[in-house]
Amino acid sequence: MKIVKRISYLILIICLLSVQASLPEDAFGQKDKTLNEQLKEFEELKAELRANESQQAVTKEEIGAAREEIAQLSQEQEDLEKEIETLNEEISQLEKDIISKNDEMKNIISYYQLSSTGEDAYLEYLFTATDFTDFIYRMSIAEQLSDYNDTLIDEYTDLIKENENKKEEASAKMVELEAKTKELESRLIKLNSKLETTMEGAMSIEQEIEVMDRLIKNLKEEYNMYKCDYNLTYDECIIEALGDQLYDTKFYRPLQSGRVSSVWGPRSFTLGGRPYSDFHRAVDFSTSRGSKVYAAANGQVKLVINAKASYDKNHKNVCGGNKIYIIHIVDGKKYTTAYYHLKDIKVKEGDLVTHNTVIATVGGTSYEYWDNCSTGAHLHFQVAPGHYGDEFKTYSGFNAASINPKKVINYPSRGRPFSGR
């Protein structure tokens, strides 16, 4: 009877294990929105940007302070991401430990099923065994297993409890990270006009609104092209229609060769004779001017910023120069990649590309007079989970959600050259 209870307890624990809650797949996950909901969100964002338009005139000291605020918050976000990564590694090890204990339990249960009571085991043994000494040995082992089983149940129960606690802790950290990301995005929107001339990729309020109007126009055109109801989500319409054309199995380097000149994280540099410090949310690859820039994975060109055309019209340059944003689905997950400091742009919004498509050439030199924050030929490469125009709708949102590119592509340490994609 005692052994039967133990077996029931073991089976109950295994059943409990099978219904454990899993972690969210994406720390930045959001509820999918219909096109009508997306359009409403765009209008709310434009209203928020216009409300901050009066803050455009600021001093250099205020710009410096704004950069420091963003760098500090970005560093906090980076530290939190590392905490989550560590927690997930601990959870992964716990899962392996539980599987190991689970296998031990299965062996014990299998043994008990063969010899659930001493009398039945004896009768069965009389018909099958030829060595009485071996029978005595087996019963002795059964007693030892019974004692070991008590310890095993305690260890197994503790592992499950520890694993559940780790998952709850990681989930709480993810919620905290999402809140910090939203806080950073909000801060970037408010400070955007202060930083537009010294922060890579930043747009003026006027540019942000113009870009959002283009995204709205392109979205409507795509929905109409695929005859989708505006109450369908982006995934239900566009991604369903594009199918495998957005998918890829991995990311590739965007250049055939080059050298890593700046990595993700805090940095200090001199621009125009003035010292600056910021949090670089990308990786920079130095190479020769005019080198081919490739899409990092199969996808769709979501946004093209032609800074040259804007400068020729308005005589105002911005940091980052010509830029391209491409959306992807890599290994089942959504991403947006960005490419800054471009000389010539070879694609247009809506184009479908593969990881072998040449999308632009490298700029960043003084010849690119429309770009005011680069001192040499290089490519600024940035990655964020989610799709520009869907999960985030502004440069600020993209920048806030950006992750270390090292997480998705392989490249050497700073100062080291590379060859091949």
Image: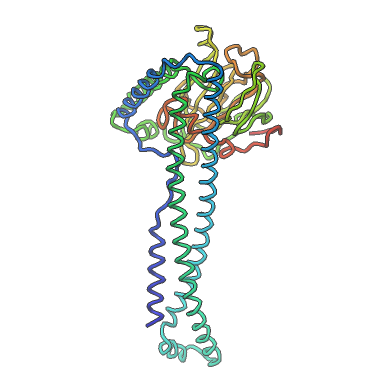
Q: Quadrant of residue 30?
A: top left
Depth check: 113 or 368 in front? Answer: 368
In front here: 50 or 134?
50
Q: Nearer the viewer, residue 278 or 405?
A: 278
Q: x%, y% of residue 240?
A: 38, 35
Image quadrant for the C terminus? top right
**In this figure, which colouring scheme has been used for the structure?**
rainbow
Q: Position of residue 8 (x, y in %)?
A: 37, 73
Vertical relation: 317 (above or below) 113: above
Q: Residue at the spot x=54%, y=33% of the render?
A: 72
Q: Residue furthest right?
A: 416
Q: Quadrant of the N terminus?
A: bottom left
Residue 141 seen by the camera = yes
Residue lying at 30% horizontally and 32% vertically, measured from the top left:
232
175 relative to 88 in the view: left or right? left
x, y percent for residue 187: 46, 28
* Rendered position, 301 above or below 111: above
Residue 77 x/y as whole percent? 51, 37
